[in-house]
């Protein structure tokens, strides 16, 4: 139990540290929002004092001019409206810039994380964390936390002024505060567990929805649309059950607090009525009592209402920290000097497996050389794509070494060498956007002439017959193009990349034999100074290669 409390305190401390760092990064916006909140408290308290004065003058308890009091009230109310407008404008700007900054931070972290560690998370789960969880943290920093501080100030101000007016009533009402703290303590523990369940089930729904949309064509082909809808409804019902549990507990806790504050308001009202009846206070003081109690009640309920936001942010931070802790790739760019050229890549006694106890490669030995086209051959699942990942430095050998050499020295394969490697993966991924934008990913400096020449080399002449040519827009994943067209564009993008090494992982599998032969011969002719490594099952491709390695199942 002691360990749990210590861990909980440590987690809350981490959250506060994180909030402090975020606030410091845009201290001006935080300061302005807090200043506006403090001024708002001052205006609210001043309006209560002004109201008391006006009523006392109107009931002839004190002398003075009602007009000045009413003008003062009008100015205070106008000031509050202006402050609300300013707070809204500053808050929206702060909220959006903070969301963008955090999204960029975690997006960058995911991109630079080790590939193997990254694969532990479903893309839908990552999207849920980067989307919803960041939103919870931003809401806490921009809205909830400043309001929490202002609410504490408002509560303290109301208590002090009420104490000046009537000490006994203040002491009676102060009994409610420990009750609020006790309920909040119980509330926090329970709501944290429910918040975790909600976020996890929300991620599951998002994962399933994303996969289903991406594979809608397969769902139609298998005629399983209704089954998939039922499965989604089942997952949504699990999510709904957690949300309703959260809501039931929230409503119960709020009802207890509301009952306590209603009792406090009734106590103040009764107290004021009896004192007014006995001529111990003025009607203005009675009005001030009720306004101050309302001013205490609102902040206290506000404090209770802010607890879910703290819990949501607390849970969100835990989930985002899991992404933050993903091991980062160590890309030492000093390894790749401008004069460095990859002449040879050597696999020496390499063993690798994705799961403990199950090896994909065992004691593998390969030598890939510049100026030669090498084929990797073998049945599906025997490790050809794994070799590609080792060549890209996405994974590291569990035993043995992968060495990159120039004419002088050799280095262990590292992420930094990727800038010298062009890669066409299975699936030949294209991004949404124009053909020009996709090709520019290979070389942002390539002009139209270079792109056209490269497209011809990759047998992608079809681009020139499209209405918008290079400016033709591609849908997600290149939808709308044939598999062969997508492959040829992916090859063209890799050729624009340049580099010393060209990796082709089943890059021509969707092409007819004649087109495939033309591309392979073209690549070999134009890539005499490159190291070309091809994964293929096609005999006509393998025959063109200078040498081949046959991989077998372990």
Image (cartoon, grey):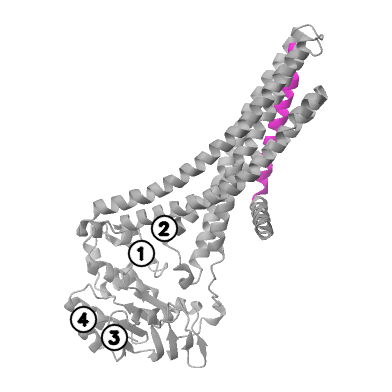
Name the front one of labels 3 and 2: 2
The alpha-carbon separation of the residues under discs 4 and 2 comes to 39 Å
Of the pair 146 and 363, the residue shown nearer to us: 363
The quarter of the picture where the N terminus appears is bottom right
* Kind of element beneath mark 3: strand
- To which residue does mark 2 refer? 124
* For the residues bearing labels 1 and 3, Cβ distance under 8 angstroms: no
* For the residues bearing labels 1 and 2, Cβ distance under 8 angstroms: no
The alpha-carbon separation of the residues under discs 1 and 3 comes to 30 Å
Q: Residues within 10 Å of mark 4 (few under 14, many from 20)?
A: some
* For the residues bearing labels 4 and 1, Cβ distance under 8 angstroms: no
In screen coordinates, is 376 left or right of 112? left
> N-terminal of the two: label 1 or label 2?
2
Q: Is residue 478 above or below residue 142?
A: below
Of the pair 161 and 260, the residue shown nearer to us: 260
Q: Residue at x 76, y 16 (%)?
A: 285
> N-terminal of the two: label 4 or label 1?
1
- To which residue does mark 3 refer? 377
The alpha-carbon separation of the residues under discs 3 and 2 comes to 34 Å
**Whether residue 138 can be seen here:** no
Which label sits on residue 517?
4
Q: Residue at x 66, y 33 (%)?
A: 299
The quarter of the picture where the C terminus appears is bottom left
Residue 7, percent across and down?
A: 65, 59
Q: Magenta segment, which residues?
A: 26-55
Name the front one of labels 1 and 3: 3
Name the front one of labels 4 and 2: 2
* For the residues bearing labels 3 and 4, Cβ distance under 8 angstroms: no
Residue 64, percent across and down?
A: 80, 10
């Amino acid at each position: 139990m002691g360990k749990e409390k210590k861990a909980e305190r440590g987690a809350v401390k981490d959250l506060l540290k994180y909030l402090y760092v975020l606030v410091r990064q845009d201290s001006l916006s935080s300061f302005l929002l807090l200043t506006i909140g403090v001024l708002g408290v001052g205006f609210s308290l001043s309006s209560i004092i002004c109201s008391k004065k006006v009523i006392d003058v109107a009931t002839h308890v004190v002398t003075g001019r009602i007009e000045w009091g009413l003008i003062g009230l009008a100015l205070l109310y106008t000031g509050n409206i202006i402050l609300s407008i300013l707070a809204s404008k500053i808050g929206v700007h702060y909220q959006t810039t903070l969301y963008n900054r955090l999204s960029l931070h975690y997006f960058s972290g995911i991109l630079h994380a080790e590939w193997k560690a990254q694969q532990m998370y479903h893309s839908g789960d990552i999207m849920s964390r980067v989307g919803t969880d960041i939103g919870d943290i931003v809401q806490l920093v921009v809205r909830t936390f400043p309001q929490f501080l202002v609410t504490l100030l408002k509560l303290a101000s109301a208590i002090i002024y009420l104490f000046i007016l009537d000490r006994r009533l203040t002491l009676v009402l102060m009994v409610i505060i420990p009750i609020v703290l006790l309920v909040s303590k119980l509330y926090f523990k329970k709501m944290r567990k429910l918040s975790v369940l909600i976020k996890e089930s929300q991620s599951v729904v998002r994962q399933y929805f994303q996969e289903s949309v991406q594979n809608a064509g397969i769902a139609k082909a298998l005629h399983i649309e209704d089954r998939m809808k039922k499965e989604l409804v089942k997952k949504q019902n699990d999510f709904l059950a957690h949300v309703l549990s959260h809501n039931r507990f929230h409503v119960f806790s709020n009802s207890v607090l509301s009952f306590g504050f209603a009792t406090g308001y009734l106590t103040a009202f009764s107290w004021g009525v009896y004192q007014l009846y006995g001529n111990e206070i003025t009607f203005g003081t009675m009005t001030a009592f009720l306004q101050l109690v309302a001013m205490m009640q609102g902040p206290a309920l506000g404090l209770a209402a802010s607890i879910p936001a703290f819990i949501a942010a607390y849970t969100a931070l835990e989930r985002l920290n899991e992404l933050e802790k993903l091991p980062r790739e160590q890309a030492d760019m000093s390894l790749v000097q401008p004069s460095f050229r990859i002449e040879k890549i050597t696999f020496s006694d390499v063993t690798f497996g994705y799961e403990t106890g199950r090896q994909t490669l065992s004691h593998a030995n390969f030598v890939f050389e510049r100026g030669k086209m090498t084929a990797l051959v073998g049945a599906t699942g025997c490790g050809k794509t794994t070799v590609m990942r080792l060549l890209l430095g996405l994974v590291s050998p569990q035993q043995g070494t992968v060495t990159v050499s120039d004419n002088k020295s050799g280095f262990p394969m590292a992420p930094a060498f990727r800038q010298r490697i062009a890669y066409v993966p299975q699936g030949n991924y294209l991004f949404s956007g124009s053909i020009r934008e996709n090709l520019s990913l290979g070389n942002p400096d390539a002009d139209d002439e270079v792109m056209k020449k490269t497209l011809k080399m990759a047998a992608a002449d079809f681009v020139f017959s499209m209405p918008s040519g290079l400016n033709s827009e591609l849908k997600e994943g290149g939808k709308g193009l044939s598999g062969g067209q997508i492959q040829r564009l992916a090859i063209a993008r890799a050729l624009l990349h340049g580099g010393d090494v060209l990796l082709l992982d089943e890059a021509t599998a969707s092409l007819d034999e004649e087109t495939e032969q033309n591309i392979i011969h073209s690549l070999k002719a134009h890539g005499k100074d490159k190291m070309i490594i091809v994964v293929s099952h096609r005999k006509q491709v393998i025959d063109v290669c200078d040498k081949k390695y046959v991989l077998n199942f372990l």
